[in-house]
Image (tube, rainbow, N blue to C red):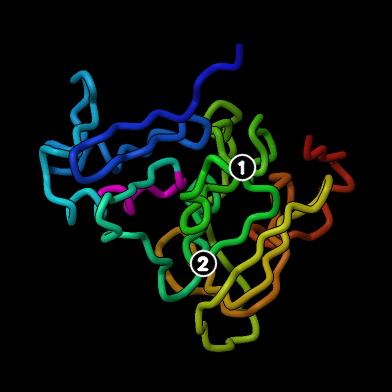
């Protein structure tokens, strides 16, 4: 029997879902003030102990798409960020937000339409998604971004993300890349970002995946 990975926490007005396959324990939920998530409590998530607004806010903080919320009255439905962004995490993954269309995203992970953490160390066992392997493998990259892109205005819209077999992540759509310090560093609408961990021009692909024999599966 397959191990259960998606858990639902139902309240009288909202149901919060947690997808364990995507969670990398950033703890935005657990450290949020209030009683929605309390570690060690059973169940740890209780939507009735806070407002619908707080449920929507805390769920949207989750950077991996592991958390989603459904409201019985149809309110509080998550909307994408007005602009698409990639945050290049210090020694970590690519945190992506916006109106996302990730190729072959699992059907039971609706949060990936808005938020995702994508592997860039090359070692994740859940590619293209991060599973914190960068920590065990000692991946080191501080998130510097040297290029500026085409400097087109980021008007949002759909951002498609296609993991190329044994190659980079291809992004098509209006996009802003933020460096590890939070600076808006690159603007454009088409870019290949490294996911093998070997590029000398991170976060951009420089073809190193061919030299290191990177395998996406």
Q: Secondary structure at mark 2?
A: strand
Horizontal side of residue 26 vs 192, given as left or right? left
Q: Nearer the viewer, residue 9 or 104?
A: 9
Horizontal side of residue 114 vs 101, given as left or right? left
Q: Is residue 191 above or below residue 111?
A: below
Percent from the top left, x then y, of residue 2? 60, 16
User: Residue pushed farthest top?
Assistant: 1
Horizontal side of residue 180 vs 78, given as left or right? right
Residue at which label 2 appears: 99
Q: Which residues are magenta?
A: 58-65
Q: Is residue 200 visible?
A: no
Q: Nearer the viewer, residue 52 or 202?
A: 52
Residue at which label 1 appears: 106
Pointer 2 with pointer 1, Cβ within 8 A: no
Residue drawn where x is 63% and y is 55% of the image: 102
Q: Is residue 109 above or below residue 134?
A: below
User: Residue pushed farthest bottom?
Assistant: 152
Q: Quadrant of residue 202?
A: bottom right
């Amino acid at each position: 029997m397959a191990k259960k990975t998606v858990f639902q926490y139902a309240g009288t007005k909202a149901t919060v879902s947690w997808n364990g396959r995507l969670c990398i324990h950033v703890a935005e939920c657990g450290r949020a003030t209030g009683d929605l998530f309390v570690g060690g409590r059973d169940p740890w998530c209780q939507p009735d102990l806070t407002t619908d607004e707080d449920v929507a806010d805390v769920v949207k903080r989750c950077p991996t798409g592991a958390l989603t919320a459904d409201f019985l009255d149809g309110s509080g439905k998550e909307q994408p960020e007005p602009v698409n962004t990639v945050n290049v995490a210090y020694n970590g993954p690519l945190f992506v937000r916006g109106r996302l269309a990730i190729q072959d995203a699992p059907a039971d992970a609706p949060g990936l339409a808005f938020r995702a953490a994508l592997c860039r160390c090359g070692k994740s066992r859940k590619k293209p998604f991060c599973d914190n392997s960068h920590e065990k493998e000692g991946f080191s990259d501080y998130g510097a971004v040297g290029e500026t892109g085409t400097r087109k205005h980021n008007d949002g819209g759909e951002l498609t993300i296609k993991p190329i077999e044994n190659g980079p992540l291809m992004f098509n759509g209006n996009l802003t890349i933020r460096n590890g310090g939070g600076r808006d560093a690159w603007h454009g609408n088409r870019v290949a970002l490294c996911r093998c961990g070997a590029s000398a021009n991170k976060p951009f692909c420089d073809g190193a995946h061919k030299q290191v024999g990177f395998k996406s599966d």
